[in-house]
Every structure is written in structure tokens, then in C-alpha cells.
Amino acid sequence: MSTPSKTKPVLALFATAVATGVGVGAFAAGFIWLVGWLTQLVWVALPDQLGVEAFDTWWVVATPVLGGLLVGLGQRFLGFHPAPLHKALGAWRSGRGIAAKTTGPAFANALPPLVFGGPLGFESALVAVIGGFGAWAGDRIGQVGEAVKACLGIEPDERLPKVWRTTPAW
């Protein structure tokens, strides 16, 4: 009889991991789709609607200028997000991770340069956006994991070196 009661918390942890993983994947796919759709809108659909050749007229100058203005406004009001790729990866390697609260500003600040032709690499935007959302998911999984440990009566093994107890699984 005690086995089913111990199974429920583990299933809850598994369900949380699956749900948050699906959420992160859907968010990433949505971000990639949105960038593609907005790029198509800005560089193909709008010039066609205005009767302008996108790459042979003033459009090729005006569009990046508008994008630069949006980048500047985003950095002014939302902060300097996303972080450069080497800084973001360095944060992950050091165990700090990417703060979940930077996901929104990174998302908003990554769109203009990706859509309007700025120099932001797509991988930097993905690391910031998915890393921040992944950090949020990791926090949720960790909370459920603590609840599972409490339900099962599992205590951390103090005999293990601290580095093994605190090192992330990756």
C-alpha cells in the first residue's frame, strides 16, 4: 500500500517536467515562427502593399533605420537584453544561469534587430529567450522536486562533497 503513495509525487514531478518542457519548446517554436512571420511582413508584404521594391529603393535604408530606433528604445526602457552570447553561456557555466525575469525584455529586444536586419545573431536571441524561460521551468521543477523529496522523506546526503550536491545535472 505504501508504493502508490510514493508513486504520486514522482509522477507529479515527471508531469511537471514534461509540461514545462513542452511549454519551453512551444515558446521557442513560437518565437522562431514570429521572427519569420514578421520578417516576411516587413521585407515582402509591406513593400508589396505600398508598391515599393524592397531591395532597390529607399525601403532598404528606411527599414533598418526604423529597426535601429526600436532597438534604441528597447535598450533605453527595457535594458540591455539579450546579453551577448559569450556572457550568457558564461553565466550558465558558472551555475548562475539566465534570470527568468529577463525573458520578456530579451524577447522584446531581440525581435527588432532580427526582423529589421540588425547585427544580432539569432543564436544569441534564442539563448536569452529560451534560457530565461528554461530557468523559469527549472525553478518550477525544483519546487516540485523539493515537495517530492519531502513526501518521500529524502534528505540530502551530507557525506557527499558539497560540489557534488550543488552541481547542476548538466
Image (cartoon, rainbow, N blue to C red):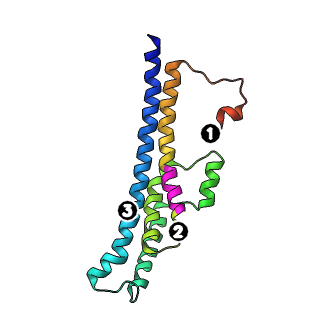
- Residue at image coords 42%, 70%: 115
Specify the amino acid type for callout 1: Pro
Q: Is the magenta stretch mostly helix, strand or loop?
A: helix
- Seen at 41% across and 44% down, the residue is 22
Q: In the image, residue 166 lies at what x, y percent?
A: 65, 35
Answer with the quarter of the image where residue 66 lies.
bottom left
Helix, strand or loop for disc 3: helix
C-alpha distance separating marks 2 and 3: 16 Å
- The mark closer to the camera, 2 or 3, is 3
Query: Of label 1 and label 3, which has the lower sequence position?
Result: 3
Q: How many labels does the image show?
A: 3
- Mark 2 or 1 closer to N-term? 2
Q: What residue type is labelled 2?
A: Leu
Residue 141, percent from left and from top: 49, 36
Taking the image as drawn, is residue 81 in sight? no
Location of the N terminus (image quadrant): top left
Residue holding disc 3: 34
Residue 116 in which image quadrant: bottom left
The magenta segment is 123-132
Name the mark on residue 168: 1
Image coordinates of residue 85 in percent, x first then y, are 59, 60
Q: Label 2: how many residues lie within 10 Å, few (<14), some (14-19) or many (20+)?
A: some
Q: Is disc 1 in contact with disc 3, using a CB cutoff of under 8 Å? A: no
Query: On the rendered structure, is 23 left or right of 50?
Result: right
Q: Residue 120 carries which label?
A: 2
Dot 1: element: loop
